[in-house]
């Protein structure tokens, strides 16, 4: 019997790379029936905390959860920097979850001229994931990571699934093709999924153009909506399936121009009291063995 609550099957999420228009973001997210936003939180300099607070407050009023999105590729080898970011996110008390979009396979100027899939990068990437509590972590993974050997498990896909929830980047526009490329990750997660240790997979699609892949990005809102519904119907038989995610909110909303957030628009910031908290402090609800001292909180 699946341990996935029925409500998860229709859950929608989206990446948010620019949070400077909280009102526009939540207006678009509400219209698009989103339940979670992966909000990019820069590592340096520290982000504008009052604007993030406004976004969190507006999201909480609409029942939308925020996950802190981290995407610094250098973290694969610089784990101390990743911990500093982790501690800032924790101290803000705005994010019940962390979402990592760190892609070590993308061309990068690694020290010593090493290239993917050098074992040092695979080991560094998995060590990066281990800096975060697994029950609060979700990770973006390519659908083809079953082809990369793991360190102690058959593939890198298996290594990641053993550590966290995942969003598989199944960037296609035809629902059958989306499920076809996501199926390996879903099957591997199903094999690990138990009631006591569930393994969840979100299926990600792209509203943004994908260079070199004309059949990977959506160009019409009605086609995207139908595809999301079809993906839910097709993937719902998987015990590990936990909904869909769209990259990204800006491009998705731009398919319906009245919804598009105004990049850079600050809006009117509400006043916040010292006890303000938009969501339960889930990070502190369980004992967490942090491996480094916490950095100073944002002020």
Image (cartoon, helix red, strand yellow):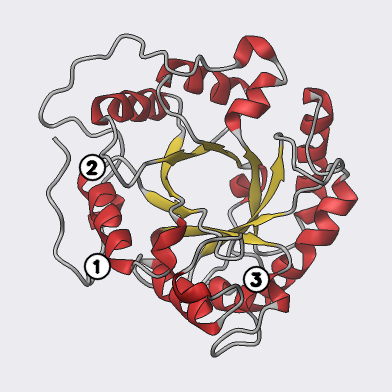
Q: Position of residue 156 (x, y in %)?
A: 61, 77
Q: Residue at x 43, y 40 (%)?
A: 40
Q: Secondary structure at mark 1?
A: loop
Helix, strand or loop for disc 3: helix
- What distance separates the C-alpha of mark 1 from that of mark 3? 25 Å
Which residue is nearer to you in this view: 151 or 202? 151
* Element type at mark 2: helix
Give me the disc on residue 189: 3
Residue at screen point 23% across, 42% down: 92
Mark with earlier residue (1, 3): 3
State whether residue 98 is above or below residue 1. Answer: above
Disc 2 from disc 1: Cα separation: 16 Å
Q: Residues within 10 Å of mark 1 (few under 14, many from 20)?
A: few
Quarter of the image that includes the C terminus: top left
Residue wearing tag 2: 92
Residue for badge 1: 288
Residue 141 is left or right of residue 133, and the answer is right
Q: Specify few, some or many for label 2: CA neighbours under 10 Å numbering under 14, 14-19, or 20 or more.
A: some
How far apart in space, not on screen, are marks 3 and 2 (Cα)?
31 Å
Q: In this rendering, which labeled residue sits more in front, label 3 or label 2?
A: 2
User: Residue 208 location in percent, x, y?
Assistant: 70, 35
Q: Earlier in the sequence, mark 2 or mark 1?
A: 2
Q: Residue at x 14, y 64 (%)?
A: 293
Please, which residue is most extreme toward the front here?
112
């Amino acid at each position: 019997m699946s341990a996935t609550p029925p409500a998860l099957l229709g859950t929608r999420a989206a990446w948010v790379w620019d949070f400077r228009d909280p009102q526009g973001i939540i207006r678009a997210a509400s219209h698009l029936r989103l339940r979670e936003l992966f909000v990019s939180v820069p590592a340096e300099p520290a982000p504008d905390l009052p604007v993030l607070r406004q976004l969190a407050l507006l999201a909480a009023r609409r029942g939308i959860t925020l996950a802190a999105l981290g995407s610094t590729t250098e973290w694969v080898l610089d784990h101390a920097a990743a911990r500093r970011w982790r501690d800032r996110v924790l101290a803000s008390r705005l994010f019940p979850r962390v979402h990592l979009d760190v892609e070590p396979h993308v061309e990068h100027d690694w020290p010593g001229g090493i290239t993917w899939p050098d074992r040092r990068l695979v080991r560094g990437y998995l060590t990066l994931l281990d800096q975060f509590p697994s029950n609060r972590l979700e990770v973006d993974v390519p659908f083809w990571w079953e082809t990369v050997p793991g360190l102690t498990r058959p593939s890198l896909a298996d290594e990641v699934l053993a550590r966290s929830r995942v969003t598989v980047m199944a960037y296609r526009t035809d629902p059958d093709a989306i499920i076809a490329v996501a199926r390996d990750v879903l099957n591997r997660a199903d094999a690990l999924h138990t009631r006591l240790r569930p393994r969840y997979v979100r299926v990600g699609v792209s509203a943004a153009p994908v260079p070199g892949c004309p059949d990977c990005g959506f160009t019409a809102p009605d086609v995207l909506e139908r595809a999301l519904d079809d993906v839910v119907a097709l993937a719902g038989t998987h015990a590990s399936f936990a909904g869909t995610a769209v990259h990204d909110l800006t491009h998705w909303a731009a398919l319906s121009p009245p919804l598009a957030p105004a990049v850079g628009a600050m809006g009117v910031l509400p006043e916040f009291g010292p006890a303000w908290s938009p969501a339960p402090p889930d990070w502190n609800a369980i004992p967490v063995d942090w491996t480094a001292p916490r950095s100073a909180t944002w002020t």
